[in-house]
Amino acid sequence: MSERTSNVLKTSMAGITQDQIFCRLGLRTTAYWVFTLLVVFENASGFVCGIFHSQYLRVMLNHLGYPQYFGNILGFWQLGAAAALIAPGLPLLKEWAYAGTFFNYSAALASHLAVGDEPRAWMAAVVFAVFTVCSWALRPADRRLPRPTATTRTTIWSWIGPVVIIGLMMALARFTLPKAPTF
């Protein structure tokens, strides 16, 4: 880059935030679409693996201790997530899709760690969880929920009631657990 071009860029970008620079150069949008398309592709692939009962998925489900039909259930949810992430609009549905994909990848990581797998087995789950967070963080404004209006601040005291209620519900659940059915 010539010195003249560098000076023009410095002058035209003076007082601009890093976020605005990314937007002007299109880097933010490009990064968003790269991460999003990778996550969408992985979810669409998960649907195809589940529906066609791929050998890889059958072996992996067996290895992790999941029933084979879990692939069908997970596959349809992955298709829904892929569709929601790629579709225009629908910001609330996108939030749910991002949460679901993150839960999927974090559960995959936990499952691999629970059976003692080495990093090569669970690293893809970590990478796609990171891709999901990157896609979520880089979303354009039209793919985000509107910012909430000013509300009153939540204090520590407002959490006491819900925490106590949840504690009571867990205690009640412990004493009312059903007996295991016999099949």
Image (cartoon, rainbow, N blue to C red):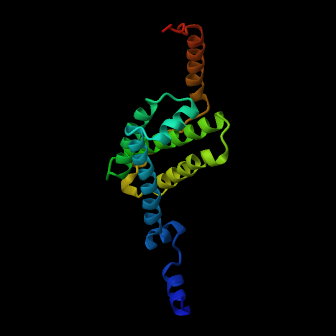
User: In this view of the protein, which residue sits in the foreground, 112 or 13?
Assistant: 112
Q: Residue at x 33, y 47 (%)?
A: 90
User: In this view of the protein, which residue sits in the foreground, 111 or 154?
Assistant: 111
Name the image quarter holding residue 2.
bottom right
Q: In which quadrant is the N terminus drawn?
A: bottom right
Q: Residue at x 50, y 8 (%)?
A: 181
Residue 24: % across, % down: 44, 72
Q: Residue at x 53, y 78 (%)?
A: 14
User: In this view of the protein, which residue sits in the foreground, 19 or 62?
Assistant: 62
Residue 21: % across, % down: 49, 71
Residue 111: % across, % down: 59, 35
Q: Residue at x 40, y 34 (%)?
A: 72
User: In this view of the protein, which residue sits in the foreground, 117 or 81?
Assistant: 117
Q: Is residue 148 visible?
A: no
Image height of 125 relative to 60, above or below: below
Residue 44: % across, % down: 39, 47
Q: Is residue 50 visible?
A: yes
Name the image quarter holding residue 79.
top left
Q: Is 66 placed left or right of 89 in the picture?
A: right
Which residue, as the protein is rendered here, is positioned at the far left?
A: 88
Number of numbered callouts drawn: 0
Which residue, as the protein is rendered here, is positioned at the far front?
A: 55
